[in-house]
Image (cartoon, helix red, strand yellow):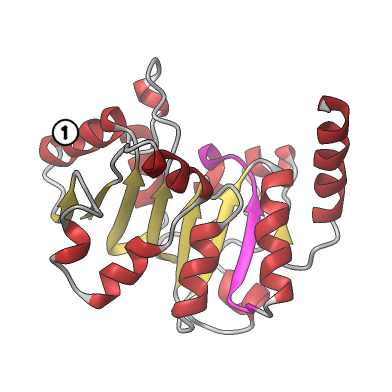
């Protein structure tokens, strides 16, 4: 069974190379001081428009990237993940549905500031990120990553975090308090409280469920959500 699964991952990984909506920089390009060719030009060169860009970092199969793109045609969406076999599903679905406002970037989130210029990104989504229980510095809402987001977001850029982890959510709220980030929305129980108390727009965004979110909800693990600005 494991051999079959390994071959399937390899097939998907190889197929991703052929998808026109997937960008795969090399490690050398990610670490180079030479600006990446698409840096500052994603909307114009890749999407052929001047629409604002929204990122999903650690997108996995791209459920949120796809869900948002289906609803909000006035934005370009880019899902970012290092795993090509994961991106395969989202990229393939986007092509099949002719979602021309969707692309995927295969790279580590650590390098995100290498690929976008200051002010090029309107909003960031962190969906069910690894809580990194033993490495707080590697949490995607740590000061190290927030500095990277600040270098690519528009002024007063928005960060959304949706998570099943009490540890990551509590840590994020502590960071919001410590650094005086304006907190726009917060809920420790999205489906128990937030989804009944807010606008249809937020209800739609919260209703997009990833594979792992559905799995955790089935185990009665609550979904947490926060939205805040960092500058």
Q: Is residue 69 magenta?
A: no
Residue at the limit of the structure toward the top, as seen here = 134
Task: Tell me the SS state at disc 1.
Answer: helix
Q: Locate the C terminus by quadrant.
A: bottom left
Residue nearest the observer in this picture, 206 or 21: 206
Range of magenta residues = 99-110
Q: Quadrant of residue 123?
A: bottom left
Position of residue 23 in the picture relative to residue 52 (left or right):
right
- The answer to whether 2 is drawn above or below residue 121 in the figure is above
In the picture, the quarter occupied by the N terminus is top right
Is 74 above or below relative to 144? Answer: below
| Residue at figure coordinates x 39%, y 57% from the top left | 124
Taking the image as shown, residue 230 lies to the left or right of residue 122, namely: left
| Left or right placement of residue 126 versus residue 58 in this view | left
Determine whether, in the image, residue 94 is placed left or right of residue 146: right
The residue closer to the viewer here, 47 or 33, is 47
Q: Quadrant location of residue 39? A: bottom right
In the picture of the structure, the residue carrying the numbered disc 1 is 174
Q: Position of residue 15 (x, y in %)?
A: 85, 54
Residue occupying image coordinates x 87% and y 33%:
4
**Residue 100 lies in the magenta-colored region:** yes
């Amino acid at each position: 069974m494991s051999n079959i699964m390994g071959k399937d991952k390899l097939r998907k990984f190889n197929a991703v190379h052929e998808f026109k909506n997937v960008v795969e920089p090399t490690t050398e390009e990610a670490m180079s001081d030479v600006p990446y060719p698409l840096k500052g030009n994603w909307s114009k060169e890749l999407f052929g428009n001047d629409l604002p860009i929204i990122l999903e970092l650690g997108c996995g199969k791209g459920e949120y990237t796809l869900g948002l793109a289906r609803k909000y045609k006035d934005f370009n969406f880019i899902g970012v993940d290092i795993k090509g076999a994961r991106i395969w599903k989202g990229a393939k679905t986007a092509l099949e549905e002719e979602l021309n406002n969707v692309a995927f970037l295969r790279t580590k989130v650590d390098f995100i500031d290498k690929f976008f210029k200051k002010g090029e990104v309107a909003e960031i989504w962190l969906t069910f990120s690894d809580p990194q229980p033993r490495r707080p510095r590697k949490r995607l809402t740590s000061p190290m990553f927030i500095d990277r987001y600040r270098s690519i977001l528009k002024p007063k850029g928005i960060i959304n975090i949706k998570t099943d982890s009490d540890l990551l959510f509590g840590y994020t709220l502590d960071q919001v308090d410590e650094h005086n980030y304006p907190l726009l929305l917060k809920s420790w129980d999205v489906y128990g409280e937030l989804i009944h108390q807010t606008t249809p727009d937020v209800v739609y965004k919260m209703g997009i469920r990833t594979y792992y979110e559905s799995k955790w909800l089935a185990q009665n693990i609550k979904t947490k959500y926060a939205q805040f600005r960092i500058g």
